[in-house]
Amino acid sequence: MKGQEGVQRLRIATDQAVMASRAKSEFLANMSHELRTPLNSIIGFSEMIAHERLGEVGNEKYVEYAKDIHGSGSHLLQIINDILDLSKVEAGKLELREEHVDVGHMMDACLSIVRERAQEKHISVETRIDSGLPPLLVDELRVRQALINLVGNAIKFTPDGGSVIVEAAQSESQQPYLRVIDNGIGIAPEDIEKAMEPFGQADGALNRRYEGSGLGLPLTKALIELHDGSFEIDSDEGCGTTVTLTFPRERRQSDTPQSAQQAATLVAAE
Ligand code: ADP
């Protein structure tokens, strides 16, 4: 009897914890939404002022300030969007819009966004795509988001003149994977767990040299797990970092069950 009571109490406690976690995620999702609306005005109007769209501002300093407001506002919006996405995943509310995606095209689109930053730092970015890799059944927007986070980090945490490799291939068991390899500063083994936590940064000291919110890695992991895939990070201080996102074999077009293909076509047609 005692044992049964204990199990009952444990069940209630677990239910309460799940509800509390869901309430927190829903609160964050609502807050993020409320914050985005005024921020969009700040970003939009500061951009208009910075570009003097309605006439000259008259003082160069004001133009500089408007540019700063625009830059800071955009940065804040990025953080809020990441919080919103992460809380949506945690609340089980982020739905994937799956369709068959050509990995080469997707990689090119991601790299075009980060290439300028790489060039500024004289970092070479090499892509290696297995020509036999079939299209994958994924949510392109979400996988792009994951890849941009990883390549962005690789460029950010690699000193000038370094190199980054972005690879798309299949394992021996034909599981497709995306891999980002850099030869940058790396992460000490004892700091990897911290880096994977929301807002966690390996060099979290006040004098940190790199900008960022600490949401990129946990969000990337959550997005890949939503695809039933896995996230693996291999890094050491001074030895660079390798992150691998592995997808289930069934996400290859040739292995996608008919029912999933039909569902994807429906989503794509919406
Ligand atoms: P952010 O980059 O915004 O700080 P992330 O969640 O993407 O947040 O990364 C968390 C931390 O992990 C980073 O602050 C950094 O300390 C470490 N990190 C991530 N990627 C790399 C990398 N490629 N090389 C070295 N350190 C990295």
Image: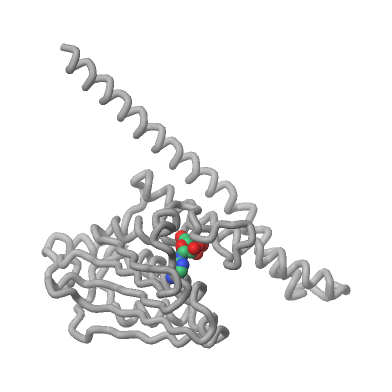
Q: Quadrant of the C terminus?
A: bottom left
Q: Is residue 53 left or right of residue 17?
A: right
Quadrant in the picture for residue 173: bottom left
Query: In the rendering, at what x and y percent does residue 223 appear?
Result: 34, 59
Residue under the image location 44 percent in, 69 percent down: 237
Task: Looking at the picture, tell me which residue is in the foreground, 239 or 130.
Answer: 239
Q: Residue furthest right?
A: 58
Q: Is residue 47 left or right of residue 140?
A: right
Task: Looking at the picture, tell me which residue is in the foreground, 236 or 208.
Answer: 236
Q: Residue furthest top?
A: 1
Q: Is residue 154 left or right of residue 208?
A: left
Note whether residue 269 is visible: no
Q: How is the image coloured?
A: one colour
Query: In the rendering, at what x and y percent does residue 246 appear?
Result: 25, 67
Note whether residue 41 is visible: yes
**In the displayed structure, would residue 124 be above or below residue 59?**
below
Query: In the rendering, at what x and y percent does residue 143 appear?
Result: 35, 67
Task: Looking at the picture, tell me which residue is in the foreground, 34 or 24.
Answer: 24
Residue under the image location 42 percent in, 85 percent down: 125
Q: Is residue 256 left or right of residue 137?
A: left
Residue under the image location 18 percent in, 84 percent down: 132
Quadrant in the picture for residue 241: bottom left
Q: Quadrant of the N terminus?
A: top left
**In the displayed structure, would residue 222 be above or below residue 244?**
above
**In the displayed structure, would residue 57 be above or below residue 42?**
below
Query: In the rendering, at what x and y percent does residue 145 appear?
Result: 41, 67
Residue under the image location 29 percent in, 56 percent down: 226
**In the displayed structure, would residue 82 be above or below residue 108?**
above
